Amino acid sequence: MLARCSSGALRGLQALPVTVEVDIAPGLPGLRVVGLADAAAQESRERVRGALRNGGLRVPLTRVVVNLAPADLPKGGPGFDLPIALGLLVASQQLAAAQVEGLWSAGELGLDGRLRPIRGMLALAMAARRHGARALVVPAANATEAALVEGLPVWGAQHLLEVVGLLRNPELAPASPPAATEPPPAAPAPDLAEVRGQAHGRRALEIAAAGGHHLLLVGAPGSGKTMLARRLPPLLPPLAHQEALEVTQLHSLAGLLGEGAGLRQQRPFRSPHHGCSAAALIGGGALPRPGELSLAHHGVLFLDELAEFRREVLDQLRQPLEEGELWISRAQQRCRFPCRVLLVAATNPCPCGWYGDPDQSCRCGEAQRRRHWGRLSGPLLDRIDLQVVMRRPEARDLGGAYRVGRTEPQAAGESSEVVAARVAEARGRMAQRNPQGAANGQLDGPSLAAVVDPKPDALALWERAISQRRLSARGAERVLRVARTIADLASEERVSSGSIAEALSYRSFDRVD
């Protein structure tokens, strides 16, 4: 007898429908899975047989063939365990075909019949709703995640026998999924007020947050590069609902959502180690998964010790940073992952870290410094809007941080809350003026030309800077984007020469004739 169940296979950020066909025919006992399944999906035959037997259900003692259609779509993971088990029950007449008609299911089975959560459930739920599923059966640990898709009934279950009971008595299906588990109390966000001195760096951080501009911090050890970078997320506006859905979907694909977790509400902050591979940073694999770049979507990607990354790894960032998305191509598929990130990078000026420091002498030779900077290609640096050289704080900046009898530092500058309010106001102006409400750092050439509106003296200063600094067309446009953000922070309708001059001050590595 032939039975069919519906499920889905992950392909990049999306899930595509898969029909699980189960055929019981005369022959030697055995279960074979066909349809371009990976090792984890092939091993489902052992998990399914164990779950059926230990759950007191009948295992067909005959030849069974499971086909995952379409046959040319690569399929991976243990999520096909549940639809294969349901197909076997229908094919062996332990369930009626009408009971699984229009029903989608996905989940991993233990040998005792328990249902274990799988990654990518949010994408599967979106595909189920898109293709008109009457309900989606998932492990109970995935039910809250799947229920984020509105208009799709979700049945969560702990055990295969519980699923069988729901199919035989649909009126027992829960009316609503369990509520999301409360996340553990988050540690207090680091406050910008704790940063002493570094007025130039603090201002660059505010501009980066307001306009979505990439930022490079260069300075000696202890100058506060990492301290500043980790105080960027609290300055960013909260995630919109659609943005939160995309972030949650990407983290689900990577298997980073906890059991019973709901919608991600905080912007991600990812800080990969400088020894990571290209696949870890960009994404990849036989069945591609998102890398650190995509996991930082709508958030911050912090690359500490930038010059220690391998050049071939960094150069793969160039196109995704420009386009806000990346494509991973394999022999049998091509997957898209979004990566609209705010890049913050930090590096020392030389291998020993003291080049240019007034108090410490550099021990590196010219050749060593050239090799150090040689890992950063010109095209990559050209895509970073703000390039800031940071100096170590002076004693007068640090003095007074602690007083006799005090155990906590005394705040010295504006807090993150005050700066975030200015950033939110600037973002509001961009949302009303820019196409699709994009931040200034995301505007393309025609959109930028329509909104930048420089004053005549500002335009003349910009043109002189292009000639004197030998800016590329991309670099020249980035100066205008930063200047437009500076004007928005100052509530100016037109870009002034002061905004252009300040934007040029954040290009520390241009050659000036």
Image: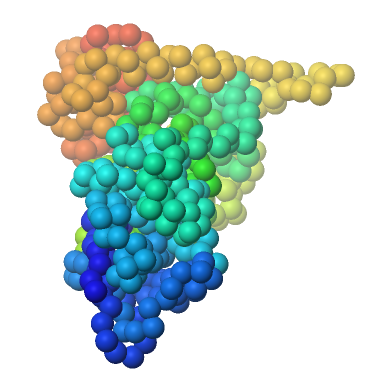
27 above or below 49? Answer: below
Left/right placement of residue 226 relative to residue 244 reads right
Spot the residue most to the bottom: 28
What residue sits 28% from the left and 78% below the top? Answer: 24
Taking the image as shown, residue 344 lies to the left or right of residue 68, namely right
Residue 65: which quarter of the image?
bottom left
Where in the figure is residue 141, as x and y percent of width and height? 50, 48
Location of residue 402 in the rendering, given as x and y in whole percent from the top left corner: 78, 22
Quadrant of the image for the C terminus? top left
Q: How many marks?
A: 0
- The quadrant in which residue 434 appears is top left
Residue 472 figure quarter: top left
Q: Is residue 450 left or right of residue 443?
A: left
Residue 450 shows in the view: yes
- Colouring of the image: rainbow
Q: Is residue 207 visible?
A: no
For the point 59% across and 29% down, the residue is 189
Viewer-closest of 284 and 66:
66
Residue 234 left/right relative to 488 = right
Q: Residue furthest right?
A: 405
- Is 341 drawn above or below residue 281 in the view shown? above
| Quarter placement of the N terminus | bottom left
The residue positioned 29% from the left and 14% from the top of the image is 429
Point out residue 5 in the picture as x, y percentages from the top left corner. Answer: 27, 61
Q: Who is closer to the viewer here, 159 or 125? A: 159
Residue 507 pos. (x, y %): 36, 33
Q: Residue at x 35, y 29 (%)?
A: 241
